Image (cartoon, rainbow, N blue to C red):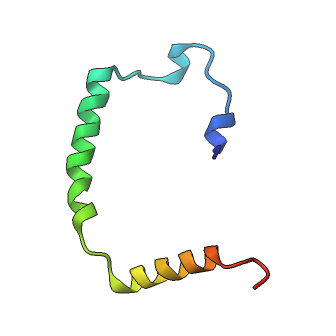
């Protein structure tokens, strides 16, 4: 799947991109984000939201003519 970002032209110089994060900083940032969001992934989903998501999945799987 391609997004709009995939079709954007690349900047002509690194200075045009803004700051560049080296591998060590990206790894640290990734670990901090994971630590922040891991507890959220373990939370129970509200039953009403779960029912809506199930209905959405069913609607997507149904034939278009039905």
Image coords of residue 40 (percent x, y): 25, 62
Residue under the point 47% across and 23% down: 18
- 14 or 48: nearer the viewer: 48
Residue under the point 62% across and 39% down: 5
- 61 or 5: nearer the viewer: 61
- 50 or 65: nearer the viewer: 65
Image quadrant in which you'd find residue 28: top left
Count of labels in the image: 0
Looking at the picture, does residue 36 appear above or below residue 49? above
Instruction: Describe residue 65's horizontal placement relative to residue 60 as left or right.
Output: right
Q: Residue furthest right?
A: 65
Image quadrant in which you'd find residue 32: top left
- 20 or 38: nearer the viewer: 38
Instruction: Describe residue 66's horizontal placement relative to residue 5 as left or right.
Output: right
Image coords of residue 39 (percent x, y): 20, 60
Which quadrant holds the C terminus?
bottom right
Instruction: Describe residue 39's horizontal placement relative to residue 6 as left or right.
Output: left
Residue under the point 27% across and 45% down: 33
Looking at the picture, does residue 23 appear above or below residue 53? above
Image coords of residue 16 (percent x, y): 55, 19
């Amino acid at each position: 799947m391609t997004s709009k970002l995939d079709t954007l032209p690349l900047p002509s110089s690194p200075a045009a991109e803004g700051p560049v994060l080296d591998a060590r900083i990206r790894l640290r940032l990734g670990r901090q984000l994971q630590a922040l969001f891991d507890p959220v992934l373990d939370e129970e989903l509200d039953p009403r939201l779960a029912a809506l998501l199930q209905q959405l999945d069913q609607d997507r799987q149904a034939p278009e003519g039905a």
